[in-house]
Image (tube, rainbow, N blue to C red):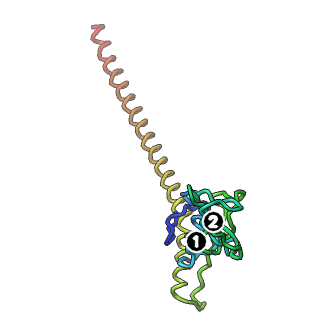
Amino acid sequence: MIHFPFYGNLVVKSISYNTRKLDLIDPKSCVHEVFLNLNLSLTPFRYYYVVKNYTYLNCSVPINGNSIPCLSGYGHHVYTVKPSVNVPDSCRAIKTVEIPFGYSSYLSDNSFGLGLTWELPKRDDEDGDDGFEEERTWVHLTTKKVPMIAGLVVLAAVAMVMKMKILYTKKMLVSNEDMENQFSEDLLAQQHKIPQALG
């Protein structure tokens, strides 16, 4: 999970280091709420896909096109339109933002479009703004932590299983030794009883 300023947490679906792509999922299942509120200028990320300007409209009555279900409700209907579109009297512009796509019922999948990319950190011998360099390094380190943590969890689970197997084997060995000792004691007791019975 990654926390983004002015929006909140987004779940990491996958990371590709080869293509420098981070696929995210919105826990609230409303990708256009993310597009409307996410401010990537405060992060080292940018959208993976090509972006265009879209204006979000809030309309009191339905207009042509599909409203965004997760942002609309009784008495208000939210749409994405190109900025050049004339705003009807029943609508007001909420915000114009650069996003990968406007709303379409065919592209309503929660994860589609929430692909981000990041810059690779510069080498020490390259010039660059130190503040931005720190942010890029943070991204590089943060994206490496996810598989590293997963690897540690798997390693801990394997170690736990091995430890349980060793303890079980030791317990079985001790149990077998106890049985052999008991058998030996019973055998000795029987041997002592035989001469007594004969005498």
> x, y (%) of residue 137?
54, 78
- The tag on residue 114 is 2
- Image quarter for residue 108? bottom right
> x, y (%) of residue 115?
64, 67
Viewer-side residue, 38 vs 97? 97
Which of the two labelled residues, at mark 1 and mark 2, occupies the earlier sequence position? 1
Query: What residue lies at 71% left-to-right and 61% top-to-bottom?
Result: 65
The amino acid sitting under disc 2 is Leu
Which residue bears the numbered disc 1? 94
Q: Judging from the image, what secondary structure is the residue with disc 2 in?
A: loop
The amino acid sitting under disc 1 is Ile
In this rendering, the answer to whether 168 lies above or below 134 is: above
> x, y (%) of residue 72?
58, 59
Q: Judging from the image, what secondary structure is the residue with disc 1 in?
A: strand
What is the residue that sits farthest to the front in this orientation? Answer: 89
In this rendering, the answer to whether 190 lies above or below 154 is: above
Viewer-side residue, 189 vs 154? 154
Query: What residue lies at 56% left-to-right and 71% top-to-bottom?
Result: 38
**Residue 89 in sight:** yes
> x, y (%) of residue 49?
69, 71
Image quarter (top left, top right, bottom left or bottom right) of the C terminus: top left
Viewer-side residue, 34 vs 69? 69
**Label 1: how many residues lie within 10 Å, few (<14), some (14-19) or many (20+)?**
some
Foreground mark, 1 or 2? 1
Query: What residue lies at 56% left-to-right and 79% top-to-bottom?
Result: 41
What is the residue that sits farthest to the top in this orientation? Answer: 198
**Label 2: how many residues lie within 10 Å, few (<14), some (14-19) or many (20+)?**
many
Pointers 1 and 2 in contact (CB under 8 A)? Answer: no
Please state if 7 lies on the left or on the right of 197 as rendered.
Answer: right
**Count of numbered tags:** 2
Please state if 83 lies on the left or on the right of 45 as rendered.
Answer: right
- Image quarter for residue 58? bottom right
